């Protein structure tokens, strides 16, 4: 990792002959860095105008940010009648963010720069019903492999993980300070603490539908849109909401749990996940095959092949009537629930994501028909309903952007910017101290017959 991270901003400032930057400079450093990072200001003149700070203050703060390798001013812009101005650019390669997506049957990992751009990604099959310790070991091994592949030329500033379940952590952007019970068994294994201890970097956890929505918003179908719904269809069905160009998370970070909405099929009632999720698709098509309505699935069953929603999607592509009917029913049920959301939220665009939604047009077409049929004319008039084009990358991209935006959120940034690295944040230092104390307590032997910590 780069040794630049350990340099003190005040020492660097004195070396350049400027007065020592004290902590009172943090607010203006935060403001200027975020103006540059978001490209709202790209020259010194624009920074002075947008920040309303004086020329000497801007020059001093930029000098500090350059010393910390957070911004760069080596590139010349276009001349407009005089000398060409120097462009002030955010150093997206100053550090890296490790990212991962956990799905019921798949695991994806990657590494991104500070803008959220993926540099490398890897996907493999996985089983989330395995012990959490095994999952953590595999994640750790894959992260180390990626770091080695990248040559460790940059600092690691964060780890961001997308999980199938909602992560109830409120609306704070702060990193995790403990392992939440996002998945069964997590409450008994400190996966967050283990990752912090191993990689010395803060960890963020978000639900998969949140990270997919963030990925679509910043790098996919949501670019240029202010209001958007992203619907993830899988074993679980969830919705992500964008309003006024920003992800809406709700009071506990649990927006979009539409899989729990009750729906009715004939004389049967159940939740949307139970009646239209990937497990339901596989179950209904197996039943259709047993009734003689799905010959391709029946043939696969005779050969002992496991029937999942993907086999149903492939059979539907080959014209299997039972598979087509099953996917159509799932699409209609999902569309009916989405229509209710659309009538309330009036989105510009609805994006269907997940392997089932992206595998063929049948589920998408059925959902579209249900949505357009049940929406108010004002809602449906200009509404776009499309399939995600990002595939499995959307969750990784969204996880990276989630961590990047959190790192540079003013509430977090102001507490580490003077040191030049987020590991200097007081909450992270306290977390590391608690982890060390817990490990020391766990490893300290005690005489037989005495209570821990007592003589």
Image (cartoon, grey):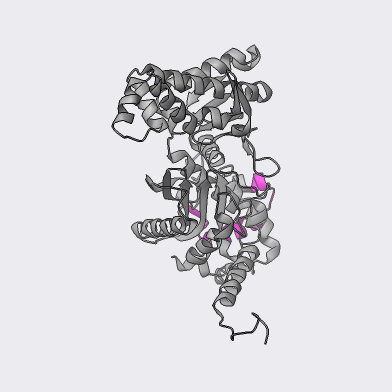
Residue 379 horizontal side relative to residue 295, left or right: right
* Main secondary structure of the magenta stretch: helix
In the figure, residue 238 lies in which quadrant?
A: top right
- Residue placed furthest toward the left: 303
Name which residue lies at 61% across and 21% down: 339
Residue 419 visible in this rendered orientation of the protein: no
Where residue 356 appears, as percent x and y from the top left, is: 44, 30
Closer to the camera in the image, 222 or 420: 222
In the figure, residue 248 lies in which quadrant?
A: top right
Quadrant of the rendering where the N terminus is positioned? bottom left
Where residue 446 appears, as percent x and y from the top left, is: 59, 83
Where residue 342 appears, as percent x and y from the top left, is: 63, 23
Residue 138 horizontal side relative to residue 39, left or right: left
Where residue 118 appears, as percent x and y from the top left, is: 43, 46
Q: Is residue 402 above or below residue 372?
A: below
Q: Is residue 65 magenta?
A: yes
Quadrant of the rendering where the C terminus is positioned? bottom right
In the figure, residue 29 lies in which quadrant?
A: bottom right
Q: Report the magenta residues as a range.
A: 48-73
Q: Is residue 361 magenta?
A: no
Name which residue lies at 57% across and 77% down: 440
Residue 440 horizontal side relative to residue 313, left or right: right
Residue 262 visible in this rendered orientation of the protein: yes
Closer to the camera in the image, 296 or 204: 296
């Amino acid at each position: 990792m780069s040794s630049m991270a350990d340099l003190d901003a005040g020492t660097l400032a004195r070396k350049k002959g400027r007065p020592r930057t004290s902590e009172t400079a943090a607010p203006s450093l935060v403001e200027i860095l975020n103006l540059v990072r978001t490209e709202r200001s790209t020259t010194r003149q624009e920074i002075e105008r947008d920040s309303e700070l004086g020329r000497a203050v801007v020059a001093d703060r930029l000098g500090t940010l350059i010393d910390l390798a957070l911004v760069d001013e080596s590139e010349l812009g276009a001349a407009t009648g005089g000398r060409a101005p120097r462009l002030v650019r955010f150093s997206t390669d100053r550090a890296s963010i490790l990212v991962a997506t956990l799905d019921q049957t798949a695991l994806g990992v990657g590494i991104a720069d500070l803008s959220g751009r993926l540099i490398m990604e890897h996907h493999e099959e996985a089983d989330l019903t395995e012990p959490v310790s095994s999952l953590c070991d595999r994640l750790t091994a894959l992260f180390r492999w990626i770091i080695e592949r990248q040559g460790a030329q940059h600092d690691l500033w964060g780890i961001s993980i997308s999980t199938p379940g909602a992560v109830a952590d409120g609306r704070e952007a702060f990193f995790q300070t403990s392992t939440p019970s996002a998945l069964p068994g997590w409450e008994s294994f400190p996966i967050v603490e283990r990752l912090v201890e191993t990689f010395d970097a803060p960890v963020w956890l978000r639900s998969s539908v949140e990270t997919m929505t963030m990925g679509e918003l910043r790098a996919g179908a949501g670019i240029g849109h202010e209001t958007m719904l992203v619907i993830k269809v899988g074993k679980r069905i969830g919705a992500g909401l964008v309003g006024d160009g920003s992800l809406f998370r709700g009071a506990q970070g649990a927006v979009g749990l539409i899989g729990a909405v009750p729906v009715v099929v004939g004389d049967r009632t159940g939740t949307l996940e139970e009646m239209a999720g990937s497990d339901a698709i596989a179950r209904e098509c197996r039943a259709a095959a047993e009734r003689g309505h799905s010959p391709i699935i029946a043939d696969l069953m005779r050969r002992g092949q496991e029937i999942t929603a993907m086999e149903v999607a492939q059979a539907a592509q080959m014209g299997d009537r039972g598979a087509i009917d099953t996917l159509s029913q799932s699409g209609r049920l999902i569309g009916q629930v989405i229509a209710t959301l659309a009538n309330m939220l009036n989105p510009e665009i609805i994006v269907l994501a997940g392997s089932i939604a992206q595998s063929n047009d049948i589920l998408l077409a059925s959902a579209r028909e249900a949505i357009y049929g049940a929406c108010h004319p004002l809602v449906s008039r200009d509404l776009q309903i499309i399939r995600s084009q990002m595939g499995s990358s959307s969750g990784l991209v969204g996880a990276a952007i989630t961590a990047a935006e959190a790192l540079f959120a003013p509430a977090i940034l102001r507490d580490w910017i003077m040191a030049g690295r987020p590991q200097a944040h007081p909450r992270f230092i306290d977390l590391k101290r608690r982890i060390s104390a817990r490990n020391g307590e766990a490893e300290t032997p005690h005489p037989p017959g005495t209570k821990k910590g007592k003589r």
